[in-house]
């Protein structure tokens, strides 16, 4: 009886392994191209970005950083941005959702994380303000980001070098989605409604926390370094602190940003 039972168990195990192998053949990608697709050149990257945006149904999650060369940030907020091939092919990189007004879809949730490098781009603040006006959620991190876009948690694109990006499909896209979620949880809001601060003061605080110099912050806000210094001094007096480091801690603790 024991021998017969062992024999039946072996046959059952063999049948199970055959089923697993059949499932693997049916559901596992047959080639690497079914999992990832390399995209080289600005035109190809821009075309894929457009395809991802237009195909979104539920959500679009984006990492944006500096060195935006497919569509520079400043160009993305003008009425007639240049075509992706308007500059020499030597310029590289891709810019996920560089044109928020054109990319907006009703019913789709947009979440955007930007880093300090992005805030040094010309017209970066204006571009983020456009996103807020469209209802996009925007957060900031201090550490550098890789350029990334994830659509509906099912398809994505990430920059892997200065000249190439990779389109991610299931199951690899899950890694990109998890990376975004982790970063999103630890990022700080670009704007918070809880503080009784003026819009300009909150912008100055964000740029200070991002590590921009007074001159760089002044360039972003269209003012002078001396005006930036006066605003920060007034905020320090309001917070009753004596250094910018203390001001940053006070701003974070009291929901000023």
Image (cartoon, rainbow, N blue to C red):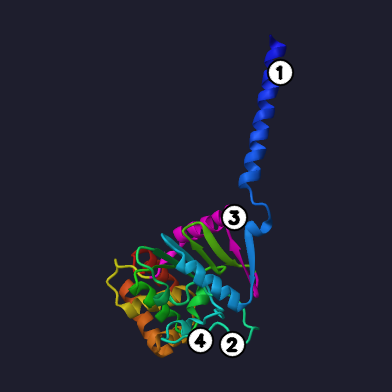
Q: Position of residue 38 (x, y in %)?
A: 65, 67
Check whether the beta carbons of the residues at disc 1 and disc 2 lie within 8 A of each other: no
Indicate which disc residue 87 carries. 2
- How much space separates mark 1 and mark 2, taking CA atoms? 71 Å
Decide which of 191, 94 is in the foreground and name it: 94
Q: Earlier in the sequence, mark 1 or mark 2?
A: 1
- How much space separates mark 3 and mark 4, taking CA atoms? 33 Å
Is 171 included in the stretch rendered in magenta?
A: yes
Q: Which quadrant of the figure has residue 227?
A: bottom left
Q: Which residue is mark 1?
A: 7
Q: Which residue is mark 4?
A: 82
Secondary structure category for the residue under label 2: loop
Magenta span: 161-190
Decide which of 46, 27 is in the foreground and name it: 27
Q: Which residue is mark 3?
A: 172
Mark nearer the viewer, 3 or 4: 4
- How much space separates mark 4 and mark 2, taking CA atoms? 9 Å
Q: Position of residue 87 (x, y in %)?
A: 59, 87
- How much space separates mark 2 and mark 3, taking CA atoms? 32 Å
Check whether the beta carbons of the residues at disc 1 and disc 3 lie within 8 A of each other: no
Determine if residue 141 is in view: no
In the image, farthest residue toward the left = 196
Q: Earlier in the sequence, mark 1 or mark 3?
A: 1
Q: How many marks?
A: 4
């Amino acid at each position: 009886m024991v021998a017969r039972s062992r024999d039946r168990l072996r046959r059952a195990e063999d049948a199970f392994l055959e089923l697993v192998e059949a499932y693997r053949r049916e559901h596992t990608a047959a080639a690497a191209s079914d999992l990832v697709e390399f995209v080289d050149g600005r035109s190809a990257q821009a075309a894929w970005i457009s395809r991802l945006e237009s195909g979104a149904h539920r959500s679009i999650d984006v990492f944006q950083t500096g060195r935006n060369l497919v569509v520079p940030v400043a160009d993305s907020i003008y009425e007639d941005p240049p075509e992706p091939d308007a500059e020499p092919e030597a310029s590289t990189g891709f810019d996920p959702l560089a044109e928020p007004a054109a990319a907006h879809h009703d019913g789709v949730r947009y979440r955007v994380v930007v880093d300090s490098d992005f805030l040094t781009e010309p017209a970066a603040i204006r571009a983020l303000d456009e996103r807020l006006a469209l209802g996009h959620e925007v957060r900031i991190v201090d550490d550098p980001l890789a350029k990334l876009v994830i659509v509906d948690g099912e398809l994505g694109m990430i920059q892997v070098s200065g000249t190439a990006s990779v389109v991610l499909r299931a199951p690899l896209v899950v890694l990109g989605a998890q990376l975004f979620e982790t970063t999103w949880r630890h990022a700080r809001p670009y704007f918070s409604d809880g503080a009784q601060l003026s819009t300009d003061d909150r912008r100055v605080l964000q740029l200070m926390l991002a590590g921009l110099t007074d001159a760089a912050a002044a360039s972003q806000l269209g003012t002078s370094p001396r005006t930036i210094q006066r605003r920060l001094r007034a905020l320090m007096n309001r917070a009753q602190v004596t250094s910018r480091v203390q001001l940053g801690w006070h701003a974070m603790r009291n929901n000023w940003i």
